[in-house]
Image (cartoon, rainbow, N blue to C red):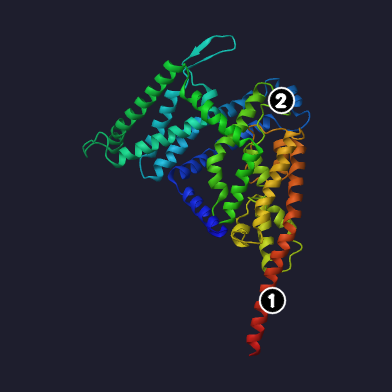
Amino acid sequence: MDKQKLFDSFIEVMSKFAQIRAVVALRDGFIMTTPFTICGSVFLLIANLPIPGYGEFMASIFGNDWTAPFNAVAGGTFNVLALIVVVAITYKFVGNEGCDASMASILALSTLLILMPPSLVTENGQLVGDIIPKAWVGSNGVITAIIIAFFVSYVFCYCEKNNVGIKMPDSVPQGVARAFTALVPGMIFFTVASVLYGLCHYLGAITLPELIFKIIQTPLQGLSDTLAGGSVIVALQGILFWAGVHGPNVVGGVVSPLLIANSLDNQHLIDMGMSLINNPEAKIITIQVNDVFVKSGGCGLTLGLLLSGIFTVKSQQMKSLLKMAFVPGLFNINEPLIFGLPIVFNPYLLVPFVLVPLIALFVTYFSISMGFMSPFSAVQVPWTTPPIIAGFLLNGWQGAVVQIINLAISTAIYFPFVRAQDKAMLKEEQDELKEEQDKKEE
């Protein structure tokens, strides 16, 4: 099999993968969590603005506990992420199948809560019961939430589509009938949850979320936090997008839960009073590294493409396109370039489109690992926040400097490829003009 056929087969497999029901629901479900994470980030950002003396100034006005109201918002968003995830993914999956998404989401939430630890031990050694532990309904329970969401979704849709349930007469109101229809799948979910809880509790004195965290989530997070793992994530995003498949959506649907969990783990270290700089427990590759530093200006760091060509290109088509795409590019919207230039299946731009984000990842990774920049906490910025501003809000002047370095490198790398593209387009324009002139002379 030659290289072209191998590449085509790879793209076909990834295209089919992107259309799998579970992958679509996972992607769309995590998109639904965006308002919670962004809003929670705003309040965390207010409590932790990277401005020297800011904390002391606010404490002098409002007292030492001035951050409590802001942290309460973070507790109601980031610290219950698993609850949000199980509802969102189930809702999207079941809704896409045309079934009762609201009822399925509530059943999934209840199933997850059944499996949660019912008590915790305080620092004083006191056992506190009848609680919902935020330690396990937050980032630590995300993988468990995903598994439960898929289990509930598949079984619920099967039951509804195959009329497995208590059928009420047509005279019964629709709302009441739907509630009785959910009794059978509900009993299935709760029975399975009860059995799993009992097995874990009596055989190992542990709960299912704790077990999944140890054997699945921790290794996956560890893999995502390596330079090799990050490189695979970044390269796949670029290759797939170049091939016409929305790489960030496909790859992000799978890895975003892990990268978000990495940033929430860092936030937990901060909440414990620990510094993230040069802390071996802190995660380096988080959702902010991918979204803000690797995709600055859009996937492929295409703001560098715009900067390298907007004042130097000569072809009218490319000049008009770059001018049109520049303002959206400042806000990380690069679809005009992806599909208008296009970058998709463009041999001139494949190398920089994949290479530039990888270099940006290396620069960002080593900036953090060497202590120049702090690992990222749970604070996020809206994805449309312009580069440099986003870096400053997340990590102070160091974050802004790293983004400037990444943009400078991307501009330099894109420049020769943009020139080659410009020459090709200019030649096409000149050939077309010559043909028109020849036709007029005839």
Residue occupied by mark 2: 275
**Badge 1 amino acid:** Gln
Q: Is residue 88 left or right of residue 190?
A: right
Residue 76 in sight in this render: no
The residue that appears at 65% across and 23% down in the rendered structure is 271
> Could you say whether the residue bearing mark 1 is in a helix, strand or loop?
helix
Query: In terms of depth relative to the viewer, which is nearer, 225 or 143?
Result: 225
Q: Which mark is residue 430?
A: 1
Residue 184 found in image quarter: top left
Residue 336 visible in this rendered orientation of the protein: yes
Q: Classify the position of the C terminus by image quarter.
A: bottom right
Instruction: Name above or below for residue 376 compared with residue 413.
Output: above
Using the numbered discs, state the Cα–Cα distance from disc 1 to disc 2 in whole angstroms: 60 Å
Q: Which amino acid type is marked by label 2?
A: Ser
Dot 2: element: loop
Name the spot of residue 199 as percent of width and height, x first: 40, 20
Q: Position of residue 431 (x, y in %)?
A: 67, 77
> Are dots 1 and 2 in contact, CB under 8 Å?
no
Q: Which label was assigned to residue 307?
A: none
**In the displayed image of the protein, which residue is found farthest to the bottom?**
442
The number of numbered discs placed on residues in the rendered structure image is: 2
Q: Name the image quarter holding residue 109.
A: top left
For disc 2, the neighbor class at 10 Å (few under 14, some 14 to 19, many from 20) is some
Residue 24: x, y in percent?
A: 47, 45
Picture residue at 61% right of the left edge, 62% below the top: 340
Instruction: Give the left or right position of residue 52, taking residue 254 as reference.
Output: right
| Residue 378 screen position, x and y as percent | 63, 32
Sequence-wise, which precedes: disc 1 or disc 2?
2
